[in-house]
Image (spheres, rainbow, N blue to C red):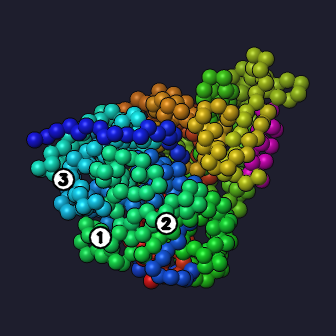
Amino acid sequence: MRTTPKSPRLVPAAVGAGLALAMALTACTPAIPGESGGGGGDSSKLTMLLPDTVNSIDPALAFSTGGRQATWLIYEALVREDPKTGEAIPGLAESWDFTPLSASFVIKEGAMCADGSEITAGTVARNFERWKDPETNAPLVNNFFGSSDFTVEYDDTARTVDVALTVGMPFLGAEPSFTQLGIVCDSALEDPSVLATGSDGTGPYVVDEFVTGSHITLTRNDDYAWGPEGFSVKDLPKTVNLNIVEDLNTQVNLLLGGDADTALLQVDQLARLEGESGFTEQVADTGVTMMMFNERDGYPTQDEAVRRALAQALDFEELTQVQTQGLGYVADFLRAPSNICVDQKAIADVIPTGGIEAASATLEEAGYAKGDDGIYAKDGVPLSVQLLQMEFTSAASELVSSAWKDLGVKVELDNRGPAQAVDVLYSGTGWSVSFVSMGASQPTGFRPFFVGPAAPEGPNFGAINNPVYAQKQGEASQVGGLDSCPLWIEAEASVVERADWVPTIAADSKWVLGEGVSFFSKGAFVDPLTLRKN
């Protein structure tokens, strides 16, 4: 008999979606455990440095890079990815079937919780219900399910779970899917408060200690016996320390001092490790720094002409050189060319360029005129923008500000740390333009930023209303698979042509591995079952 699960008792949470969610969908070339590099220390303990504050270790609420990494270590997913082939392999599900509007699973027998209860089809279904419940406010629900408007049915006897979607997810099954949606046990569904500082799942690790803003200490779950064929949990380090170190230069110091085993670093920090022995590197993902705009009423960047002119005024070659010290390159794509449904030329052809002269012409055609003070104005209102700075060096920020001032635009620079800057972005006020590094392997990874409610009600923090994108993505979502690529390419090109997002700089981030350390990484995330320290 199939039944629809009742929602468990929930603890309300007010959580906004974080920019790190795109990284959760970023593809990379996998590195297979085996080769290793420098560092040293106790082989039973591995220390991984996290680049951002862990907002939560509850799998339904975690959206930061560190939070998502922690939940992958603690909670088993329905599907895993084979690190050797890239193919989907069983997790908690022994089999599955996907269409653009449905996902069906047969749940494996024998996966146990700490209290001795077994993970059932009903357990999985109640997890899904918790994700869709408005009181949960799961920030990544749209990335896994398209929207919170989906239905779930299950049959404990047949061990089946069936999900019917209302928003098409055309790439379900095109790549391994549901690999990072961790399943919690029934006792935690009854009392989710235990997930705030502890764990109640079926993954290879359990939480020993979580100190907000400092570290997470995980202990190996030696009862874990439902991994892939041939896997032994005893091959994993007994203890994993996830240390939160937001300053990447400090991360380099810890690696060099032998106080950490691995970290994910950007190009400028990687330069400090050149010539150092005992380390290996593997490419994690290609991040693209997007120029993004606040398109709400009352902001000058609501005007497409202003957005285009601000982009045209910049010399992206010079900006890339200054920001990355020559280690990056100018981006002519929204998503890395190695990903599905990417047409570099379609994006490159519509990037606003031309320099100060072209930018001036764009503004003047839109009715702006320069005053005696050299500042453009329209209807008596001077053109003034607030630049929210979170990632650029001071030299790169000054280069941007100078170009816009030379154009005839007033610039107010607001320097913030990443966490504070994200809060400002999602508040919807106090910023006109910002530069943010993003990445997604599938077109649907960016969809929540371009359609749907504006932040804080939804992830669309720029309040973008692009009718071409909305139409093309809607059509693509009904097609499914690689056949939908032409529509997605048109949709993404419209975002750049309309200057909703403008790609500027591309740079590869890399995992740095110390001596004896190896693992398979998927973008910014490490697959816990592949962690080794010999």
- Looking at the rendered structure, the secondary structure element under dot 2 is strand
Residue displayed at 31% across by 51% down: 187
Res 3 quadrant in image: top left
- Give the main secondary structure, helix, strand or loop, of the magenta stretch: helix
Q: Which residue is mark 2?
A: 217
Residue type highlighted by circle 3: Val
Q: Residue at x 51, y 35 (%)?
A: 460
Residue in the foreground of this view, choosing between 218 and 389: 218
Which label number is shown at residue 223?
A: 1
Q: Which residue is mark 3?
A: 106
Residue 401: x and y, percent?
A: 77, 42
Q: Provide residue 196's location: percent of width, then percent of height.
A: 46, 51
At label 1, the amino acid type is Asp
Residues at discs 2 and 1 in contact (Cβ within 8 Å):
no
In the picture, measured across the screen, residue 492 lies left or right of residue 236, that is: right
- Asked if one can make out residue 259 in the rendered structure from this viewpoint, the answer is yes
Q: Quadrant of residue 82?
A: bottom left
Q: Is residue 30 left or right of residue 369?
A: left
Residue pictured at 73% horizontal, 33% vertical: 385
Q: Percent position (x, y) of residue 504?
A: 62, 48
| Residue interval drawn in magenta | 395-409
